[in-house]
Image: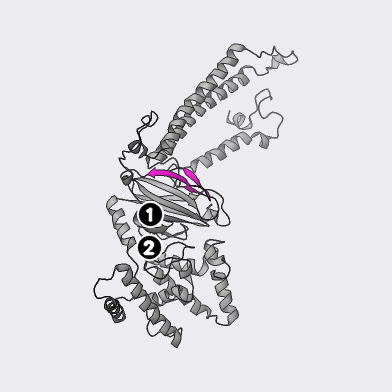
Amino acid sequence: MLRALFTFKSPAGRGLGAGLKPWAARWPVLLAGMMMLLAAGCSFTTKQSTLDPHGPVARDQMDLFMVTVRVTGFIFVVVGSTAAWVVWRFREKPEDVGKPMPHQAHGNPLIEIGLIGSSIALLVIIAIPTLKSIFFTMDMPTDNAIYPPSKLGVWYPSPPVKSAEEVLEVTVYGYQWWWGFDYKQFGLVTANELVLPEGVVVKMNLRARDVIHSFWLPKLAGKVDVIPGRANWLWLMADQGATGLYYGQCAEYCGEAHAYMLFRARVVSREDFVKWMEQSKKPVLPPGVDQPWATKALQDLAAKDPKSEATDPQKATALWAAFLARGQEDKKNNNINTANLKTEVEKGAFLFFDRSGCAGCHTINGSPAAGVVGPNLSQVASRTSLAAGILDNLGDNGKIDPDKQLSNLHKWISDSIHVKPGNKMYTTPVVGLRDVELKNKNSGADPTAAQQDQDYKDIAAFIQTLK
Ligand code: CUA
């Protein structure tokens, strides 16, 4: 019996595998086995599963998907079982051999009109929830509060939002190959890790800085293209209680490192969001501000205008100026033998601004680094990953592991071309790390390999303090 099943040979030798070599006759079983093996690898809750929604938009899309799965599943079962039944019922039997073909009936009006009618009915069943989903995802939940609700507006339930102030707005910038996130309401710019409060409607304005990208955060929202010159947008919301990390990805081929253009969304409680926002907005101070030089710099600043108290950004500017002057003093004497800047972090901070030119492309709030070509680094060490999601900073306990983070930073700075092939930090002509290294080599100012690596380590140590 089993043997018969495996060879697909009917006793009369006229079955499915008739006339084939025995191994060839087994292909349907092999195929079924492979499909089962493949299916065994499926999981509905993987990092980028669209079948594990954690917000109303993703859930709406999942529900729509399930409607089409049910309708098409129904069609598959009806058509498939009819076809199987017909093949079996009207198969050629031994006694039919040599007889003429039976009468071929077609053009039965009842069957044809019935088939057309049921196809239309099935398409309507899919069309109604599709239209509903289009309105749901393409109307901001505030629209009902701002405009009188249309008939369609009251047709679907949207999260309870009463005014535009309740909506968080984030402008997303797609770059080759990373993501910028601009919280304009709060005057805060960050990158690659989108921090969102739970249970809050978020409007994402999607803008491209170079080529077409596609914003895709499967567990919270769908996928919308980010196109130069087009003001695309989408809205999303993480469910109340859906705190945690969500994994996004650029979903439109955008060049060499497209596959490495990941991002993360970190959904936190509303209190934690406010805390993060306040912490992130603070100007970053240079290292060593507990030392006498810093006290003196602040005294000098106060003496300039005794009538009014200096603002935090003004203090940060003065402290950075004093810090960098101390570095320049060291450099004048001897670049390596540092008298003023002693710790790795201090040396790294100076290198960041001076020899490596990092400040030309990156911004650190409050410091003279105000570049907009690369990601804003002001809170880079508070992110759970590095290099647009490629290097994971998390330890086994789900928290940032400082050792892992430091080693990732060093790896990224010293060997970015292998971490993310094609990345602009390395490849940009003249100012890219590749050209800087070459220039050093050609001018004879090349530091030894060990010194170069120590420089990278120092810069990594400094960047790890940016929280
Ligand atoms: Cu950006 Cu693909």
At a point 44% along the width and 74% down the height, the residue shown is 353
Is 219 contained in the magenta span? yes
**Residue 147, image x, y percentages:** 36, 36
Q: Is residue 434 visible?
A: yes
Which residue is at the front of the view, 388 or 214?
214
- Magenta range is 214-240
Judged from this view, the residue extending furthest toward the bottom is 333
Q: Where does label 1 land, which residue? A: 183
Can you tell which quarter of the image residue 466 is in?
bottom left
Query: Would the CB of label 2 be found within 8 Å of ligand 1?
Result: no
Disc 1 marks a residue whose amino acid type is Tyr
Asked if 119 appears above or below 203 in the picture, the reply is above
Which residue is at the front of the view, 310 or 293?
310
At a point 31% along the width and 42% down the height, the residue shown is 163
Judged from this view, the residue extending furthest toward the left is 307
**Residue 86, image x, y percentages:** 61, 19
Query: Would the CB of label 1 be found within 8 Å of ligand 1?
Result: no
At a point 60% along the width and 79% down the height, the residue shown is 442
How packed is label 2: few (under 14 Cα within 10 Å), some, or many (20 or more)?
A: many
Can you tell which quarter of the image residue 443 is in?
bottom right
Asked if 453 appears above or below 137 in the picture, the reply is below
- Which quarter of the rendered picture does the N terminus lie within? top right
Q: Do the residues labelled 1 and 2 touch (CB within 8 Å)?
A: no
Q: Where does label 2 land, which residue? A: 379
Q: Circle 1 — which element?
A: strand
Q: Can residue 286 be seen in this view?
A: no
**Residue 191, image x, y percentages:** 43, 58
